[in-house]
Image: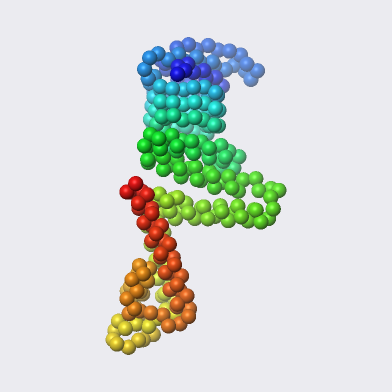
Amino acid sequence: MNKKMRAFFVSSLFDRSKFFRRVKIKRGNGGAYFECNINFGEGVVHVKSAVFRGCLFDKNEISNMTFTDCTFIECRFVAVKMSNLEFHRTKIINCLFMKPVFTNVYLDPRSFSFDFNEWKSGAANINTSLFQRLESNLKSMHQDEFARTAYIQFRRYARWQKVHRLDGLKFREIIKRRTAFLVDCLYDRSMLYGYGIFNVFITTVLAMGAGILVLNCWWSYFSITSNLNGNFPYFEDPDIIQKIYYLVVTVTTVGYGDLSPKHASGMIFVIFVLLFSVVWTATLTAIIVKRIVK
């Protein structure tokens, strides 16, 4: 295991903590920069309240360290190997991670922040790989909550990657990618990629509200008959409670038969609601099992 790390500081804005054993200034083509050779002793090195700005950690092995209340700003990690690290209350701002290797790294994916307008297009593929690798690392550590967050970020950057650089593509391919992008956005907002129970609840409430609105506007047009108030059908516009009752009975596929459509348009509406309810119930069950039981 390599216990030596070399970092080149483009800026002098960093905290010279005690773990810096030797610091010397060199001159390069771009002006002065700092070369900090960090020699590790035995055990874990603790770094607190350090600010790293414009640092290059390319092709280094960083291991056996704990960062607390640290900030990394516009640093570069290219082909870096990180192992046995912990990041607590750390901010990683607009840093470039290209082909990193994570092994037993405790890191909250919410520590990363990027300039969205810049990184969603030009560097979407880089961040897609970053969060995919981070998710695999967190899964191996059984950090399920962090792994879910990394997976969601991975899917979001992969979504932007679909619509990046559409110039030169055929019209059919452009439509295909944009459609996939919109479907992915809908999946994100409505279900949070299968992890958002609250998102599913809100979507269910909105869908039920839309169904009640449709019934309220076209109840008589659907010709829905009822035996609730006697032994004979009627077509009068009932109160809102009966409409909610009919929608809930239909969505849950109970189907008592006390309310039933007689017109073709009403039957088409019921078919649509039944198909939607079956798919939605299966999805909701899968999400609950995935989020709670598993």
Q: How many marks?
A: 0
Residue pictured at 32% horizontal, 76% vertical: 256
Please state which of residues 137 and 245 is positioned toward the viewer in this rendering: 137
Residue pictured at 52% horizontal, 19% vertical: 7
The vertical placement of 258 against 1, above or below, is below
The vertical placement of 92 against 208, above or below, is above
Q: Position of residue 83 (x, y in %)?
A: 44, 26
Residue pictured at 60% horizontal, 52% vertical: 177
Q: Quadrant of residue 269?
A: bottom left
Q: Residue furthest right?
A: 168
Residue 129 visible to the viewer: yes
Q: How is the image coloured?
A: rainbow
Does residue 174 appear to the left or right of 263 in the view shown?
A: right
The vertical placement of 183 against 97, above or below, is below
Q: Residue furthest left?
A: 230
Residue 221 visible to the viewer: no
Q: Position of residue 97 (x, y in %)?
A: 53, 32
Please state which of residues 229 and 169 is positioned toward the viewer in this rendering: 169
Q: Position of residue 17 (x, y in %)?
A: 42, 17
The quarter of the picture where the N terminus appears is top left
Q: Position of residue 88 (x, y in %)?
A: 38, 30
Residue pictured at 30% horizontal, 81% vertical: 228
